[in-house]
């Protein structure tokens, strides 16, 4: 999911703690702040810190003065051969090509397992907004190819397209049948997206809270951090990429449920909206003598079910007789593009 969705989910989970409501009523929003921060923390660790310290085995760095797709194809094939010959995990960095303060040379890498080759093509020059510069679309029509030593299996449709800011990282993991499993952004959701890491963080900050304010504050801080950090991991499991849920007890990502993509609009909207409803309900429960009385079911009906049915009905009415197809996204590519847009 998007960062704001995770943030709101964290705040919503924190609001279920009676101590959070009590503190907020006294003018102290610390648990709400802690919940939102922990809700977005796993992605913040990955995209803002960890990826800059991640080590690579092969750097594919095209020359901005003489973009050569054959060089990229050959280096990609060399990395595949390295993984096959040495039977080890190989990390590859596809470096972006900067042409100026606001211009980047786009290129794409496509794997054809039927022909057992990689295909590389340089596309248009784009600005930082990823908008192609007019007249550069067909500057490099050549498609370079290089033979691969093994099939490279993509478990999801991550587009290997390189343009602005920092280029993506891919990993080649040898499989028992001789093929290679391609992992897009192997540094993402590696160890940071773990329930055990959230629990450990809760213990550490809980210890600080115990030293500062005693046992009661300590366990409240622990529960808030572990739960709000954990909801991020749980939400990510609804997608495709999955997470390394119990690191360090587990070493690999557990595949997601494939119910959604991280960039899908409706799931992100619902996550934020339902979080707002939960926060509202928990704040309402904390009011000693509310002016209006209603149940949780009443709130959900008025705030979620009825508007949802109205929206669904209007959409059906407005698209009657039309063939509406939703464009599919991808977890890895969606999150990578979001991180690039944020700089």
Image: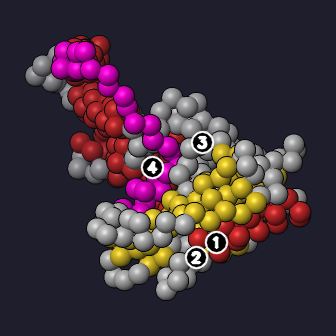
Of callouts 1 and 3, which one flags the residue occurring earlier in the amino acid sequence? 1
Sequence-earlier tag: 3 or 4: 3
Q: Quadrant of the N terminus?
A: top left
SS at mark 2 in the image: loop
Q: Is residue 322 magenta?
A: yes
Q: Which residues are magenta?
A: 314-343
Q: Which mark is residue 334?
A: 4
- Return the residue at label 1: 70
How far apart in space, not on screen, are marks 1 and 3 (Cα)? 26 Å
For image coordinates 77% across by 68% down, the residue present is 78
Please determine whether, in this image, residue 96 is positioned above or below residue 299: below
Task: Report how far apart the C-alphas of labels 1 and 2 lie in the structure.
Answer: 5 Å
Q: Residue at x 27, y 29 (%)?
A: 277
Residue 298 x %, y %: 24, 13
Residue occupied by mark 2: 68
Spot occupied by residue 241 in the image (x, y as percentages of width and height): 59, 43
Residue 156's label in the rendered image is 3
Q: Are marks 3 and 4 in contact (CB under 8 Å)?
A: no
Q: Considering only order in the chain, which callout, 2 or 4, is on the residue closer to the N terminus?
A: 2
Check the picture and name the quadrant holding the C terminus.
bottom left
Are circles 4 and 2 on residues that touch, CB within 8 Å? no
* Spot occupied by residue 50 in the image (x, y as percentages of width and height): 57, 66
Query: Which residue is located at x 24 percent, y 46 percent?
Result: 26
Graded by Cα atoms within 10 Å as few (under 14), some (14 to 19) or many (20 or more), the crowding at tag 1 reads some
């Amino acid at each position: 999911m998007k960062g704001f969705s995770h943030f709101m989910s964290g705040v919503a989970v924190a609001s279920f703690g009676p101590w959070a409501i009590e503190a907020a009523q006294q003018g102290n929003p610390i648990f709400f702040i802690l919940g939102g921060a922990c809700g977005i923390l796993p992605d913040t660790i990955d995209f803002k810190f960890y990826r800059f310290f991640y080590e690579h085995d092969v750097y594919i760095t095209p020359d901005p003065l003489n973009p050569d797709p054959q060089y990229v194809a050959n280096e990609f094939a060399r990395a595949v051969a390295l993984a096959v010959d040495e039977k080890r995990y190989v990390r590859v960095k596809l470096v972006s090509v900067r042409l100026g303060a606001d211009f980047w040379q786009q290129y794409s890498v496509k794997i054809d397992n039927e022909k057992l080759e990689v295909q590389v093509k340089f596309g248009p020059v784009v600005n930082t907004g990823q908008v192609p510069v007019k007249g550069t679309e067909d500057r490099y029509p050549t498609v370079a190819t290089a033979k691969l030593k093994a099939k490279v299996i993509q478990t999801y449709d991550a587009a290997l397209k390189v343009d602005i800011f920092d280029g993506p990282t891919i990993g080649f993991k040898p499989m028992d049948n001789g093929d290679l499993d391609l992992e897009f952004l192997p540094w993402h959701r590696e160890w940071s997206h773990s329930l055990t890491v959230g629990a450990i963080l809760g213990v550490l900050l809980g210890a600080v809270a115990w030293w500062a304010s005693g046992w009661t504050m300590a366990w409240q801080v622990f529960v808030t951090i572990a739960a709000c950090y954990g909801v991020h991991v749980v939400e990510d499991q609804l997608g495709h990429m999955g997470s390394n849920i119990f690191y360090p007890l587990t070493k690999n990502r557990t595949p997601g449920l494939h119910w959604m993509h991280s960039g899908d609009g409706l799931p992100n909207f619902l996550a934020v909206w339902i979080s707002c409803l939960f926060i509202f309900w928990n704040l309402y429960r904390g009011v000693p003598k509310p002016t209006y009385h209603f149940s949780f079911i009443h709130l959900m009906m008025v705030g979620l079910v009825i508007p949802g049915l109205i929206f669904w009905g209007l959409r059906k009415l407005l698209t009657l007789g039309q063939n509406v197809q939703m464009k599919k996204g991808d977890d890895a590519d969606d999150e990578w593009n979001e991180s690039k847009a944020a700089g």
